[in-house]
Structures are given as structure tokens and as C-alpha cells.
Image: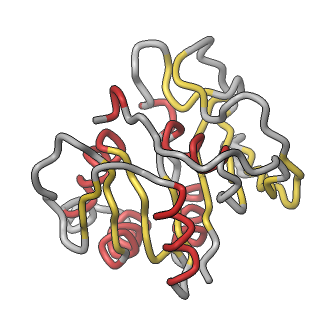
Amino acid sequence: MGRLFYSAIASLDGYIEDAGGSFAWAAPDEEVHAFVNAVERPIGTYLYGRRMYLTMAAWETLGGGPDASGVEREYAQIWRAADKIVFSRTLDSASTARTRLEPELTCELVADLKQSVDHDLSIGGPELAAQALRWGLVDEVGLLLHPLTVGGGKPALPADLRLRLIDQGRFGCGVVHLRYAVERDAGKPGTLDIGANR
């Protein structure tokens, strides 16, 4: 049985992107990137909505050029080796290997995935993660908090969520990693209205 993780890089006030949609401030330095690689290495399947997938699909070619750092090359290898499931009703095809499309995220699909795999899974993007959290299917949440505030934008976490801190770490650049077990009661099964994520 696999465990489902939700990880996000966020501002200190809890946003993954600012009001203008930018997340350039979230770029990890080499130390943080190496930590991310270690966290991602056990992940065998990524669950994405359309927008997160289109952002991450750049790693199909990134990390291979002469200017790529060691941590970038390593991350590219980790990402390419994992399966990807993209939930979208508008994408006709995937531009990356090891990728399949599904029209919608359902509680049953995620629960069956967790039961049927022998590796960990990651759910990317706050909207998709919020639904899986409501269903009680996310096992752990990891946040990399940057030492800045953006004042608004897209929140990393939904409201009304109970978490229990199980680990923490600090990096030289001021980023803090917080690892939580999820203690919220499972919600009712259903399907996610992907809306703008389509």
C-alpha cells in the first residue's frame, strides 16, 4: 500500500503564488533543492491537475543541458522515472512519457491507487490536494516556507485542516521545512470540480 503526500513551497504567510500568479520567489537554492530531491526520490506516481502538469512537464527536457546543476539533473531523473496521472477534461494528450490522462479526480480512484501500488504517491497543486485532504486520503503534508510574505494569492492549504507536526528543519537561506501528519476527519467521497484547472 502506498502513502499519499502533499508537498508545497510557500511564502511565510501561506501562499504558493502571489496575487499576480508569480512564484519566482519560490525557486530553491542548491541546499533546498537537494532536500527536495531526497523527499521526492521515493515517489513513484505524481497526481496532477492540468496547470500543475503543464508547469512540471518542463522537467521532461530540463536538467539535461551543460548549464544544469547536479541537483537539477538529479531531480529531472527522479521526475522522469515516476508515473504521472493528469486529471483534466480538456487535455487531449500528454507531452511527457509515463503519463496517463483521467477526466476527473475521484475518491475511489485515489483510494484504489493507494491500495494497489508498492510506492509512495504525491498529489500536486493546492486544489487537487484540498479535495484529497477532505476525503482523508492524504497521509502527510510537507511545507517549505520561504522567509517572505506576499500578502495574498493562491493559498497552499485549505481551511479547517488539523495537522500534527512530526518533523522540522532549517536551511541556510532561511527556508524552514515543516512536516505534518494529517489529523482531519475524512470527508464524504465525491468528485472534484476542476474548474479553472481544466
Along the horizontal axis of the image, is 134 left or right of 46? right
| Percent of width and height locating residue 54 | 25, 45
**Nearer-the-camera pick, 51 or 75:** 51
Query: What colour scheme has been applied to the protein in the rendered image?
Result: secondary structure
Count the marks: 0
Query: From the image, which quarter does the C terminus lie in?
Result: top left
**Nearer-the-camera pick, 63 or 118:** 118
Residue shown at 49% from the left, 44% from the top: 128
| Percent of width and height locating residue 192 | 46, 40
- Classify 84 as above or below 159: below
**Nearer-the-camera pick, 12 or 93:** 93
Residue shown at 18% from the left, 40% from the top: 90
- Classify 122 as above or below 189: below
Residue shown at 42% from the left, 31% from the top: 24
Residue shown at 43% from the left, 71% from the top: 45
- Classify 61 as above or below 8: below
Query: From the image, which quarter does the N terminus lie in?
Result: bottom right
Q: Which residue lies furthest to the bottom in this view?
A: 118
| Percent of width and height locating residue 89 | 23, 43
| Percent of width and height locating residue 190 | 53, 46
